[in-house]
Amino acid sequence: MESKEKTRLLTEIKNLEGRLELTLRESHRLFQSAFDALSAHIAILDEQGGMIAVNAPWRRFAAANYLMMAAEGVGWNYLRLCETAVGEGAEAAHALAAGIKQVISKEQDEFTLEYPCHSPTAQRWFIVRVTRFEGEEEGSVRVVVAHEDMTDQKRAEEAHQRLASIVESSNDAIIGMNLDGTILTWNPGAAQIYGYSADEILGASVSILIPPDHPDRVDEILERIRHGDRIDPYETVRMRKDGTRIDVSVTTSPIRDAEGKIVGASSITRDISRRRAAERERRKLSSVIEQTDDVVVITDRDGVIEYVNPAFERKTGYTREEAVGKTPRIVKSGKHGPEFYNRLWETILRGEVFRGELVNKKKNGALYHEEKTITPIKNRKGEIINYVSTGKDMTMRKEMEAALEQARAATIEKERLESIRALSMTYAHNILNAITPIRSYAELMVKRMELSDPKVKWAQAIIDGTGEVVRIIRKLEEIDRYQTTEQSGIKLFDVDPIKEKREK
């Protein structure tokens, strides 16, 4: 009986040992499966730093990176490997070795280190955590070294930092608000544009930035944001802290949380006051160009016409459609030689302003004079991109100058004739003074001599001749008096002495 009982008990013990062994194997299998399923690269070390277990991610990483513990890893002393590391990454390895020692010696409960581990094809970052637990044997220590790939997290952090840096350094106002329009974030660009500091504005409604008498679409925009719409840029007016108004361009987009739920709105506002002012100046300048009486022509660098103002159309007879795409040769008159145009082009190609007078030809063939100025237009690199030609019509001035020149020539001729007349009158008076005594002597001879005396005939001839000279001189004096009083209507006398003598 006792023998059978003993046999039964032994059988039960063996069966129990078998089941226990199966349970232990199953438990080990389950542990290893869970251990291998972890994403971190994990090694368990003894108190000397030797590896007594590694999981599958550790083995795969080691094999992929050609590490010495590429096979199982078990049996290698990880602590010694870190302590003796050289080259790239050695500094991080030495720091990890020091941390492992501190955890083993219980100076620290946990050690954490972030480090780069770049491959030839990619940049990677890891975080290693070192912890300990008590071993099976009394006083023994086991250390868990877990390396976890944090590349995605690191890149997300860097992207966040870049985005934060962009937001902080942007000159645009970047404002975050909830769906009720309450301002939650406020960058330095917003403070610069609106004049409010972050402390002053956070928690306030975005409506504080809208002029009371200026209708805006904020409520409509927030409603569209709730439905996930992005608001394309639109131009409107905003109000600064000091009450001044500014022209702005606003873009608004939804803000979503990690689950994709819309929790707020992000508004980017750009101050376009300078652009608007520049546009007003351009419109003013355009209006001046359109209304000026001076001809304005804009060409490209090759001299092809891109724009003409209405004055060009009026002066030349060519319409804008007829001129654009042509060159200024359409008004060339042929009055200037090649040397003139060579000098013109040499001047403007050097980037200098050309000034000169041109004779051009209208569409109907009529010539006109222009005072021309051609100015090169340069871009920021100093390259010539256009030419602006302005022309002032000089035709009337040229006609007046020609009339003045004709009048000046007539005046000079008149002065010359006046000089001749004055000189002639001087000679006439001198002649009169010279012949008066001669005539007096001849008249005296006629009175005192007998008529039969042949000398009387000669004396009478002298009297008749000098009388004729005197009559001519008197006529010249009458003409001189007439010219000085011509505006009084004195009739011009006939000064032909021969004709006068015949009439007598």
Image: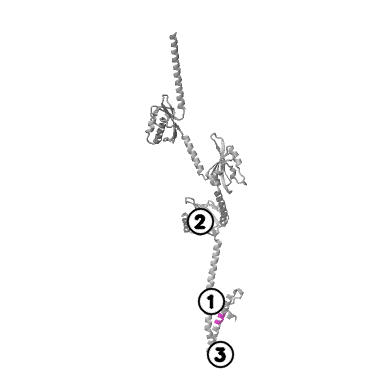
Q: Position of residue 424 (x, y in %)?
A: 53, 77
The residue indicated by pointer 2 is 374
**Circle nearer the N terminus (1, 3):** 1
Q: Secondary structure at mark 3?
A: helix
Return the x and y of residue 254 as percentages of the image width and height: 56, 38
Residue occupying the far top of the picture: 1
In the picture shown, does residue 138 fall above or below 211?
A: above
Q: Can you say which quadrant of the picture contains the N terminus?
A: top left
Front position among marks 2 and 1: 2
- Residue 31 location, x and y as percent? 46, 24
- 376 or 325, nearer to the observer: 376
The residue shown at (54%, 74%) is: 418
Say which element carries label 2.
strand
**Mark 3 neighbour density, 10 Å: few (under 14) some (14–19) many (20 or more):** few
Determine if the magenta segment contains residue 138: no
Nearest the eye: 190 or 341: 190
For the record, the magenta segment spans 469-474
Q: Main secondary structure of the magenta part?
A: helix
Asked if the residue under mark 3 is in contact with the one under mark 2, i.e. CB atoms within 8 Å, the reply is: no
Q: Which residue, given by chain and number where applicable, does mark 1 sit on?
A: 422
Q: Identity of the amino acid at label 3? A: Lys
Q: Amino acid at mark 2?
A: Ile
* Residue that label 3 marks: 447
Number of the front mark, 1 or 3: 1
Compared to residue 148, the image places residue 488 above or below, namely below
How far apart in space, not on screen, are marks 2 and 3 (Cα)? 91 Å
Q: Residue 227 or 411: which is nearer the viewer?
A: 227
